[in-house]
Amino acid sequence: MARLVIVSNRVPVPRPRERPQAGGLAVALKEALATREALWFGWSGQTGPRTGGEPTIVTIGQTTFATIDLSAEDYRLYYTGFSNGMLWPLLHYRMGLAEFRREEWEGYRRVNAAFAQALVPLLREDDTIWVHDFHLFPLAAALRAAGARQRIGFFLHVPFPPLPLFRALPQCNILLRELAACDLVGTQTETDAANLREGLRSAGFDVPVRAFPIGIDAEEFAREAERAVRGPEARRLAGSLGGRALILGVDRLDYSKGLPQRLRGFAALLRRFPEHRGRVTLLQVAPVSRGDVGQYRALRRELDELAGRINGEHGDIDWVPVRWMTRAVPRATLAGFHRLARVGLVTPMRDGMNLVAKEFVAAQDEADPGVLVLSCFAGAADELKGAILVNPHDPDEIAEGLNAALVMPASERRARWTADIAVLRRNSAAAWAEGFLAALAEHAAEPARAGGW
């Protein structure tokens, strides 16, 4: 079997006794890496005097991790600037938050070229290269320019907007041309695939683009949840609830996740359905991410104020309606929290997939499952038909969805859960990875694309 080469912005090199956090590419690729020799290449997460240089190599089992540092300037331009300041909001349909600066665009492409220069000497002739996410749109072209002739696949984990919106990006055709150096491009949903396919064709490229919805190992997560719900953290949470129903939200602190809308929806629940006052608690876990970006600092302030206002208006001496945490919680602990929850509340304004929604379903007790209230703009909504779908732009619709979930009879909860868990077991993380790699093998590097695309 050919070696698999994973390329991502950040490489999660395992550390002794480290417990994985919720989500992440490492979790999704666990099965694929366990069955073959692999090289995982990318940024170390550290800044140094310059970008690139000789990669740092660590081998654990069948997987070799190779990382390079970024200079502080390139970190600012490539990561904080173009990737997070321009591409992230654009790809999540938030053009009003996007900021284009030519120096950041140039830094973004320079770092991708540095990745290629450092990776090519590590490649074998029969490697299969799998590039992940929007930080690395130009990488396939940079690899081709550096002499790589291996088959290259690209997977976009976030949404891709309609072409008229994507065209708001200066130099968008250059980015599409560089992505066209891939042999296969994957997205989370058929909608994203259609949008990206249209973009590539508008730039004159007919590259295969297909949807490969990412999954989880539902059975493993269910076992984790069964263990964790008996652990000290879950028991402490259950005891503190005093018999109240738990509504659980788990997200990175990010404006794409619809967190202000979620809190407003919960406030509307308490206002419109007063029978739930004092009988339900919302626990929102939102670890801080990209704290060096001004928009994220402003978001945290907004959420601090919203949570405080809801607690001030609706709370009582023995009841705090909103519990608000901005520190990271281990994935195993969260599994127990999911199993305790009566409702999983997932309200992104736009999301490629959202694995938290799938983890909530997988964690449930089949005899007494909770209900998922899910944004219709999450990729997971295409698969999880048992969820109550809501439009996060409407707080009243969120409130109505929460009320429906809280009063839903057990028979309906079980029927909805049974349908969704069957989907998760079929569309697992292993099935996602193997499906993409099998499709990539069918599109073996064509001379026209590998040589000049």
Image (tube, rainbow, N blue to C red):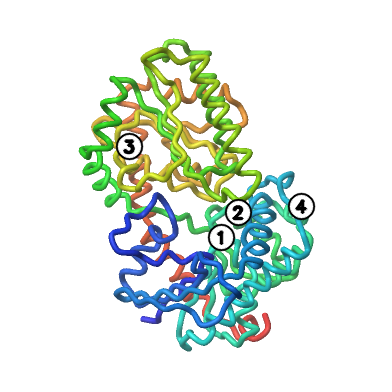
Pinpoint residue 234: horizontal percent, then vertical percent: 27, 35
Closer to the camera: disc 4 or disc 3?
3
Of the residues shown, which amino acid type is indicated by label 1?
Leu
Of the residues shown, which amino acid type is indicated by label 4?
Pro
Closer to the camera: disc 2 or disc 3?
3
- The residue identified by callout 2 is 192
Q: CA distance from mark 4 to mark 3?
A: 41 Å
- Give the mark nearer the N terminus: 1 vs 2: 1
Residue at 48% x, 14% y is 314
**Are the residues tagged 1 and 2 within 8 Å (C-beta)?**
yes
Give me the disc on residue 156. 1
Q: Quadrant of residue 194?
A: bottom right
Within-10-Å neighbours for mark 2: few <14, some 14–19, many 20+: many
Give me the disc on residue 437. none
Closer to the camera: disc 4 or disc 1?
1
Pinpoint residue 413: horizontal percent, then vertical percent: 34, 29
Left or right of residue 13: residue 414: left
Residue at 57% x, 74% y is 183
